[in-house]
Structures are given as structure tokens and as C-alpha cells.
């Protein structure tokens, strides 16, 4: 056994839509391939936006990927010679992805995950908070706000659909900064006086 490759790791690349997560995943994969490390790339079968078999960035970079129905399928499809496991759109996987990623790192694989940290309601997306906490390395990247050009951390849904996962429609979202992101369902963006904000929180602390 070579000790050189024994230590695995978890890298997470996150940010809103259009922030370059897929480009960054592809960049890391290509560099691993230059280092002659065998890479397997997975994506959830749910994400068929551009291509069933490819990971495609918004700037049309592509790389071959294996679509999988569930997180456990990643373990089932793993090949002996693989050293690096890259997973795009990792936010769409079930909670088992946390166990799968952890087990892979424990077995010495380098795991590179890319995914949305927040959903269109600006709430943490599925397994992402735990993956970010467990990661050895986190990269949080920004897109460009389509309204003002500032760094964008949020994905604005442009239609009124309420379901969390809405894919196949590439023009359904825009990147927005905090100031230009609008969420009708948020309990209102109008700010209360600070004492009013503190009261219910202080109540929770007392209980
Ligand atoms: P992600 O995977 O985070 O959705 P991609 O890697 O697929 O992002 O695409 C990033 C690319 O999208 C950028 O390099 C740029 O060419 C393009 N792009 C389109 N709209 C925007 C935007 N509002 N902000 C930044 N990049 C954008
Ligand atoms: Mg992407």
C-alpha cells in the first residue's frame, strides 16, 4: 500500500447559480487528469438541463459524467483505479450523500463537490450545510448581480413556481446580490426596530 495517496479529502465549491461552480469543478478535474489521477464524475440523474451524460457549464464547457439516481449509486459505480471523485449539483442528492462523501474520504479518495449553498428562497440547500462543515476545504464563489453588477450570492427565481427543484428551465433564474434579491415569501423585508427583533429571540433563549 502506498501511503502517499492514503489521505482522502473533501472539497466543496459553493455559491449561487452562474457563479462558476461547474467551471471550477471542471478545472479541478482537468488538473487531476493532467496529474494522471483517475477521476470519476457524477451528477444527479435529476439534472438533465443540457445533457444526460455531460456536466455542462453556463459557458458551455463540458466534461463526461455519470448520472446517478441516488447517493449510494456513487459507491456502487466506483472503480478500483479511481482516485478522485467529482460530484456536480451535489445539493440535489438525498442525505445519504453525507455518508457517501465521508466514507470516500476515509478510504483515501479526494472528493470534489460543487453545489448551490442556498435554494431560491435563500435557505440552506439539502445536505449542503453538513457537507460544508465536514469539508477540508471550502470555496464560496460569487456570480455577478444582473441588476447592478455587484458580487451576487443569491439565485433569483423569475417565475412564481413554488417547488424547490425547478430544472430544465435555464432562463428561470438570475444571479442577484443581497440588495437586489427579492423573496415574496420572506416574512417581510421591512425591518422592525431592533428591540422588536430581539424580543422573540430573547423569549426563545429563556425557554
Ligand atoms: P454554476 O455552475 O455556478 O451555475 P457555471 O460554471 O455553469 O456556473 O457558469 C459560470 C459562467 O456563467 C461564467 O463564467 C459566465 O460565463 C456565465 N454567466 C452568465 N451569467 C452570469 C452572471 N450573472 N454572473 C456570472 N457569470 C455569468
Ligand atoms: Mg453548475
Image: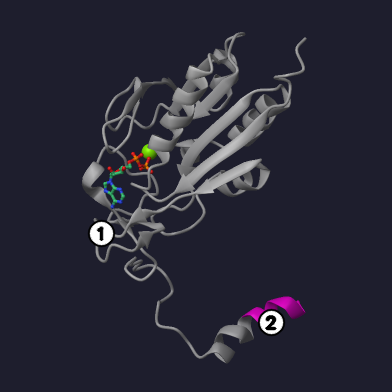
Residue shown at the point (30%, 60%) measured from the top left: 145
Query: Looking at this view, is 111 or 119 the one in front?
Result: 111
Q: Is residue 182 shown above or below 14?
A: below
Q: Main secondary structure of the magenta part?
A: helix
**Could you tell me if the residues under marks 1 and 2 are in contact, i.e. CB atoms within 8 Å?**
no
Task: Please name the residue that numbered disc 2 is placed on.
Answer: 203
Which percent across, then down, holds residue 79?
57, 10
Q: Is residue 131 above or below residue 80?
A: below
- Quadrant in the picture for the N terminus: top right
Ligand 2 shows up in the quarter that is: top left
Badge 1: few (under 14), some or many (20 or more) residues near its Cα, within 10 Å? some
Which residue position is annotated with label 1?
A: 146
Whole-percent x, y for residue 138 in the image: 58, 45
| Residue 76 colored in magenta in the image | no
Seen at 37% across and 48% down, the residue is 19
Crowdedness near tag 2: few (<14), some (14–19) or many (≥20) residues, C-alpha within 10 Å? few
Residue at the location (40% across, 49% down)? Answer: 164
- In the rendered structure, which segment of residues is drawn in magenta? 201-207
Say which residue appears at 22% left-offset and 46% top-offset: 171
For the residue with label 1, is its CB less than 8 Å from the closest atom of ligand 1? yes
Quadrant assignment, res 81: top right
Left or right placement of residue 34 versus residue 100 in this view: left
Taking the image as shown, residue 80 lies to the left or right of residue 159, namely right
Amino acid at each position: 500500500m502506498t501511503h502517499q495517496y492514503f489521505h482522502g479529502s473533501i472539497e466543496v465549491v459553493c455559491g449561487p447559480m452562474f457563479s462558476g461552480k461547474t467551471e471550477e469543478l471542471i478545472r479541478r478535474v482537468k488538473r487531476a487528469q493532467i496529474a494522471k489521477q483517475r477521476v470519476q464524475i457524477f451528477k444527479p440523474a435529476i439534472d438533465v438541463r443540457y445533457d444526460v451524460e455531460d456536466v455542462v457549464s453556463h459557458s458551455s464547457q463540458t466534461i463526461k459524467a455519470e448520472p446517478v439516481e441516488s447517493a449510494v449509486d456513487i459507491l456502487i459505480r466506483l472503480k478500483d483505479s479511481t482516485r478522485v471523485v467529482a460530484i456536480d449539483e451535489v445539493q440535489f442528492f438525498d442525505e445519504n450523500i453525507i455518508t457517501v462523501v465521508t466514507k470516500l474520504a476515509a478510504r483515501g479518495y479526494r472528493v470534489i463537490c460543487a453545489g448551490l449553498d442556498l435554494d431560491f428562497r435563500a435557505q440552506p440547500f439539502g445536505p449542503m450545510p453538513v457537507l460544508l462543515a465536514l469539508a477540508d476545504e471550502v470555496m464560496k464563489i460569487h456570480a455577478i448581480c444582473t441588476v447592478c453588477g455587484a458580487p451576487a450570492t443569491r439565485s433569483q427565481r423569475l417565475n412564481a413556481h413554488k417547488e424547490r427543484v425547478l430544472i430544465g428551465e435555464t432562463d428561470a433564474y438570475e444571479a442577484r446580490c443581497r440588495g437586489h434579491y427579492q423573496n415574496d415569501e420572506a416574512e417581510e423585508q421591512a425591518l422592525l426596530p431592533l428591540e422588536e427583533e430581539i424580543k422573540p429571540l430573547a423569549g426563545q433563549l429563556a425557554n
